[in-house]
Image (cartoon, grey):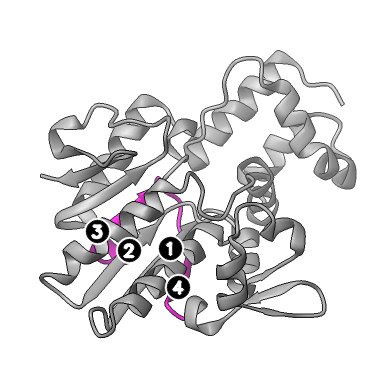
Amino acid sequence: MDISKSDFALFRDFLERVCGILLGENKEYLVVSRLRSIMKEKDFPSIGDLVKRIEVDSRLRERVVDAMTTNETLWFRDAHPFQILQKRLLPELCEKQKSVDIWCAASSTGQEPYSISMIIEEFKRNNPGKLVNERVTATDISNSVLESARKGEYDQLALGRGMPTDLLSRYFSKTDNGWQVMPIVSGRVQYRMLNLLHPYSALGKFDIVFCRNVLIYFSADLKADILTRIHGVLKPGGYLFLGASEALSGVASLFDMVQCSPGIIYRKK
């Protein structure tokens, strides 16, 4: 399947408009590889014909966005954000409250929110009575990955991507097809569909927001807008985690940078 320059431009504009993702130049190969099966199934002669159809077919539009936004994810990705959460932020929060509200944006198939929940459980094991009310809100634009995350079922290959053996034995039960997240971990995680271009106010207020390895897909203006609105749902003094290659694009005045050695987090001003 080939894609013309004009069709690529048409699809690129569509993708940025509906979900904010900005495809770089010369990414035609990515569009072709991600959409090949849909194009074949629906027998569309060109990407231009696909774009015309998805403008009026919401179910097909969702499938296309799913195909373009579904990315691989890891357990405890980069390690230090979870160490900071367990050793610094949870103890700090427990000095003034017994609850914690965390938002995991772009939660994909559940590895990050369940990693966060396991860290909370580990903290509670070592600090009985310090936390009694914990909420992890996990959002993603893709219905299909949210459905997968809610099931909490993972095969050995998926668990081989970062899952420590001690936590696997403590927080998963063996099934015929792999491993199931135990309710003690999954019970505090609530999954919701959310497009980061849409309002966040209905989510509530948060002590901590994980928005990692997401902003790299957006334009500079959209990054600034998303970060400004995340600032709006953080509680006073709340913390923001970004990905290792991400920074406060144009909104540095809203946050204080906190060096954690290793790692950097951002505190709401």
**Percent coordinates x, y for residue 268 in the rendering:** 16, 47
Give the class, few, some or many, for how many residues have Cα within 10 Å of label 4's Cα (few <14, many ≥20): many
- Which residue position is annotated with label 2? 102
State the SS at label 3.
helix
Q: Amino acid at mark 3?
A: Leu
Say which of 77 and 49 sits in front.
77
Q: Give the quadrant of the C terminus.
A: top left
Q: Amino acid at mark 4?
A: Val
Q: Nearer the viewer, mark 3 or mark 2?
A: 3
Rounded to the nearest angstrom, the CA distance separating label 4 from label 2 is 9 Å
Which mark is first along the chain, 2 or 1?
2
Q: Amino acid at mark 1?
A: Ile
- Which residue position is annotated with label 3? 89
- Which residue position is annotated with label 4? 189
Residue displayed at 55% across by 69% down? 167
- Which residue position is annotated with label 1? 116
As displayed, is residue 168 above or below residue 37?
A: below
**Percent coordinates x, y for residue 219 in the rendering:** 41, 27
User: Residue 133 is drawn in which quadrant?
Assistant: bottom left
Going by the image, does 33 lie left or right of 201?
right
Residue displayed at 17% across by 62% down? 92
Rounded to the nearest angstrom, the CA distance separating label 3 from label 2 is 11 Å
